Structure formats: C-alpha cells, structure tokens
Image (cartoon, grey):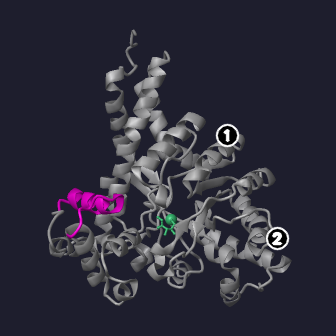
Amino acid sequence: MIVPDDSVASAEILQTVEDQLQSIPFIDVHTHLFMPSLGRLGLWGIDELITYHYLEAELFRSSTITPAEYWKLSKREQADAIWHALFVDHTPVSEATRGVVAVLHALGLPTAESSLKTAREFFADQNPDEHIDHVFELAGISEAVMTNDPLDPDEAPLWERGAGRDPRFHAVLRLDRILNKWADHWRVLVSQGYAVDADAGAQSIAEVRRFLDTWCQRMQPVYMAVSLPDTFAFPEESVRARLIAGAVLPCCREHGIPLSVMIGVRYQVNPAIKLAGDAVGKADLHAVEHLCVQHPENRFLISVLSRENQHELCVYARKFNNLMPFGCWWFLNNPSIVEEITRERLEMLGTTFIPQHSDARVLEQVIYKWRNTRRTVAPILARMYGLLADDGRAPKVEDIRRDVHRLFRGNFESFAGISR
Ligand code: FIX
Ligand code: ZN
C-alpha cells in the first residue's frame, strides 16, 4: 500500500503510539491523593506504599499473621511484616507487589533488599512539594483529581479554614457518607447548621441542597462523586434516591458539573481486614439507564466494578451521550482485564471514553499505575490503527496525537467543563 507522507507506516505505528502516550501529560481523574495544604491526609513514602490495602489483602493470604496481630503493630512494623512476607519470602509477581518494585526502581532505589532501611532514608530526605513534581513527572501526569469528603472530621475543618489551592490537584465533592450512611451522619449536618432529620423529607432535601451549594463554592469541585453497592437501584423508595434526585442532581446542574457514580461494591465482606475487606458484585445497571433517561440535563461519569457489567455500560454509553465511562476500577485494574475492557470500549465507543484512572491512595503509586496503563494500552491502540490501515486508511501522527490527548485529557476536560 502506498503510504502518503504524513501517514504512519505500519511498522512505525507502535512506536508512534508509545511516543504520543509518553509526550502527553495525563489527567488522573480519580485518586485519593491530597494537595499539600490538606497536610497529613496526603499519604506518601515507603511505609504507606507497603501498607496499601491491596498489599494487606495479599499479606493475609501469604503469611500466618492474623488481622488482629497485624493491627496491633505500628505502621513501620506493619510495613516490615508485609515487605518480608511478600517481597522476601515470596516473589513479588502480583500487580500490586510489582508496582512497589517499579516505584523503587523508578526512584533509583534497590528492589530486593531484605529491609526497608535504604528506602526509608531516601524518603526522609525528600522535600514534599518537590517530590510531588518529581513523582508526577515520572508518572506522566499533570494533574490529579482528589476525593474530598465534606463530612470527614479531619478534612472538613481544613477546607473551612480555607485550604490553599494547588493547580496540580482538582477537588471532588465525595458524598458516600451523606448518600450511603445518612442514618449515621445527618446529625453532622445539623451540627454544621442545617435543619435536616433522619427521615430526609422535603426540608432536609432542601437543606442538603444548601449544604452542597456551600461546599461547591468552598471546594470548586470538578465533579461530585459517590461509590455505590452492587444492590444500587434508582429510582427507589429510599433516602439515597430522594437525595440524589432532589439535591445532588439539581446542584450538579446549577454548578455545571457531572456526578460520578462508581457502582458495584460489596462493602466490608471481611471487616477484619478493614479497607481491604470490600469485594465486588454484579450490579443491575437499569439504575444507570434510569439516571440518564430521567436526568438528561445531568452528566454522569460512570465506572462499574464488576467485569460482568462492562459490556452493558458500553452499550448504555452508545445510547446516552450524557454518560462517560471511565476507568478500570480497583479489582479491574489488572493488565489482562484492562486490555479486555479497553479493546471493547474502543470497538464500541471509538475514542469517546476515559480509559483509566489510578485510584492512587499513596502519592508514588501513580508512577507504576500510569506506567502499567501506558504499557498495556500502547499495543491495543497500535493494533487498532493497524486494523484501520489494513482497512484502507493509514493513521497520521496527528490522528494518534489527537486520540491519545482525547482519551487521557480532552474527554475529561470537556465532560467536566474544565477545558483550557
Ligand atoms: O470508592 C472508591 O473510591 C474506591 O476506589 C476505594 O474505596 C477503594 O478502597 C480503593 O482504594 C480502590 O482502589
Ligand atoms: Zn477510589
């Protein structure tokens, strides 16, 4: 086939894709990272990296320590226990353990020592603010979207006192306590001056709307967000459904921001292992259909946790342009599954989705999570362009640059309304 000048020859496609993936800084649309002005909420460093709940889950499979014994240890002792069990007594081949190895390697640290001494000395020397820049550069991201909880007793006062903003971090108004645990938390709203009650009747809904409005002005969130169980239904006769329809969605419309719904968690199936104790369940996605049909003026960023729900979500995205699928969330963030989901989305949605987010809870995790994403996605995109060339249209460098920019920046910027 004659290849016109600005088209990419088949043999060059993979390299061109890799170059574009490397050269375009991504926006990480969902993390649990925090900007410096939110202080100790932001986790970083070796002990936090090693005691990540993904690794805690693997520790309890790979050693005889019981959760009760583990929680009695200090953070440092917990990290030592995990390092020994998963990185010394076992070969670190799982996605999460290999991730730690990749981070240590990227920071020029040894990856196979019997102790964490060298790593601890390295992190003790870091200037936190410069370290964020260095880590973001290694990860190839320019911005991270936080998860900010207005009912978190440690976080809320920092915002109320006027937490300084940082262009590297975007805020998100996270609503899990309000929507999933109203019975436990409505009194906190009362203590903040809102006339709500346990029943969440019309007045409570109006007051929650006022609460959300106040926090939107305070945080300037790029979206509101909630994680939801595999049993989530909408509409339904519940406080959650009433608050979503009567307060959350109207407030999102007023502030021109999307609602992110992350569906499919089976919370705390094993409470003994705390954060690591959540699991996954296949959800009935009719709730997504009803949200999109009944609230066409709202935009929905949607991620589903169950592998079995991915195809349905793709089909719904073909029906509703106010639905933006994003990420291979949590238990899906493994190359074999990311490959499957990303190929299916490209085949069904073209480049009109957001392939991934890191869900990083510890700063340095963005290094391996984005390197793994680039490593997994590059051959998938290259194969797609190869098929396009076989079908009679060789891709141009500009096509590839534009598509990568769209997938990892542009789609989010335009859907969240933060286009530069
Ligand atoms: O709800 C969420 O945002 C989840 O991502 C977290 O709760 C989960 O614990 C996690 O860290 C997943 O990667
Ligand atoms: Zn998350």
> In the drawing, does residue 25 fall left or right of residue 176?
left
Please indicate, yes or no, whether residue 140 appears anywhere in the rendered image: no
- The residue pinned by badge 2 equals 237
- Give percent across and percent down for residue 419: 56, 47
| Magenta-colored span | 89-109
- Under tag 1, what secondary structure? helix
- Seen in the picture, residue 268 relative to 344 is either above or below; the reply is below
Which residue lies at the image location 66% right of the left edge and 48% below the top edge?
323
For the N terminus, the image quarter is top left
The structure residue drawn at horizontal position 26% and vertical position 79%, both measured from the top left corner, is 81
Q: Is residue 100 magenta?
A: yes
* Residue 288 drawn at (x, y percent): 71, 54
Amino acid under disc 2: Glu
Going from the N terminus, do you reach mark 2 or mark 1 first?
2
What secondary structure is marked by label 2?
A: loop
Q: Nearer the viewer, residue 175 or 410?
A: 175
Q: Which residue is mark 1?
A: 318
User: Residue flagged by tag 1: what amino acid is it?
Assistant: Arg
Crowd tier of the residue under label 1, counting other residues whose Cα lies within 10 Å: few below 14, some 14–19, many 20 or above: some
- Residue at position x 68%, y 52% from top? 299
Q: Which numbered tag is attached to residue 409? A: none
